Image (cartoon, rainbow, N blue to C red):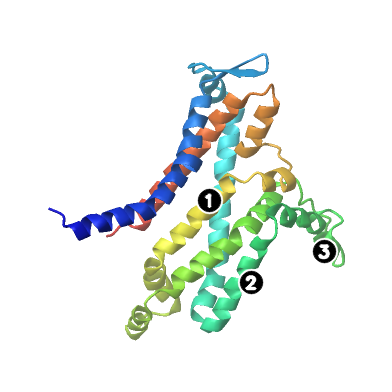
Amino acid sequence: MKTGAQKGLDGYALTWRLPVIFWQLFFFVGPLLFTIAMTFFLVKNYRMTEAFEMKNWVKMMGKGYFWDSYFLTVGLASLSTVTATCLAFPAAYTLAFKVSDNARRWAVFFLIIPFFTSYLVRTFSWYVILAESGVINNMLSWIGFGPYTMLNTKFGTMVGYMTLTLPLVVILQTLSLANVDRRLIEAAQNLGANGIWTIVKVIIPSAKVGLIIGAVFCFILSFGDFVAPYYLGGSKPPTLPIMIIDTTKSGQQWPRAAVVAVVMMVTLMVVAFASIKFAYRKK
């Protein structure tokens, strides 16, 4: 049986958990349930009416353009995740092992600064750089190259994704690598492992959880981003976030847009839970 002190402790712990529980209920579970319920509504005369029919699901799941957009969004988000992870690792490794603690703190601070500015503003700034008469093409013209079309392409979309995700991935990887036990690295080197094998066999497995979490955050942000594919990628063909906007503008079809949103949330949950399970899996 629990003592009075234990019961008091449970009540104290529950008191501090309640704000988190209510936050999740009101701002995640509630809207999620409402979105799922909306997928069964019908639109008549540009007004939603309560119903419980599968017409919206059949309509959206049976369209080829929906699956084209789905696989395009998954592919771009996956490419963004791989690119950001590979670009971030050398920078994070340098910050974790090659610089002083003070320099690392300043570097993390400067990586956080871009988040003080609106992501939309940072995205629009790429117009000046990527345009056919922009900075990059002007520099290339000096050596006889270009102009190259970089806006309204998948390359432009990836630039926008990197603007959104790369600083965050570098920060998460740096924090994870900085916590690797240095004694393991010294032991590997004493046993004859060179730098590459030490990274592959010791550092990456030891920092696996943080590296995977950084990749998951990158995938989630890229998968749900509307700004980069719309303003830098040209929105043709549309990704799923753009399809949601287009669907709501087409006859106020909020229920069909809700179908797209639910598919996106299910995909993200599957990716997140599968990644976390892999991250914490033990041999």
Give the SS element for disc 2: helix
Q: Give residue 110's mark.
A: 2
Q: Which residue is mark 3?
A: 140
Q: CA distance from mark 3 to mark 1?
A: 32 Å
Position of residue 96 measured from the top left corner of the image (x, y, whole percent): 49, 76
Q: State which mark lies toward you, 3 or 1.
A: 1
Q: Of label 3 and label 1, which has the lower sequence position?
A: 3
Question: Looking at this rendering, what residue extends furthest in the top direction?
Answer: 45
Graded by Cα atoms within 10 Å as few (under 14), some (14 to 19) or many (20 or more), the crowding at tag 2 reads: few
**N-terminal label among 1 and 2:** 2
Q: Position of residue 256 (x, y in %)?
A: 58, 25
Q: Closer to the camera: disc 1 or disc 2?
A: 2
Residue 8, placed above or below residue 97: above
Foreground pick, 229 / 105: 105
Amino acid type, label 2: Phe
| Number of residues whose C-alpha sits closer than 10 Å to that of mark 1, classed few (under 14), some (14–19) or many (20 or more) | many
Q: Is residue 224 left or right of residue 17?
A: right
Q: Residue furthest front?
A: 4
* Secondary structure found at label 3: helix
> Image height check: is 104 above or below 161?
below
* Residue occupying the point 48% across, 53% down: 216
Question: Amino acid under label 1?
Answer: Phe
Residue pictured at 83% horizontal, 62% vertical: 135
Name the secondary structure under disc 1.
helix
How far is the residue under mark 3 from the one under mark 2? 29 Å
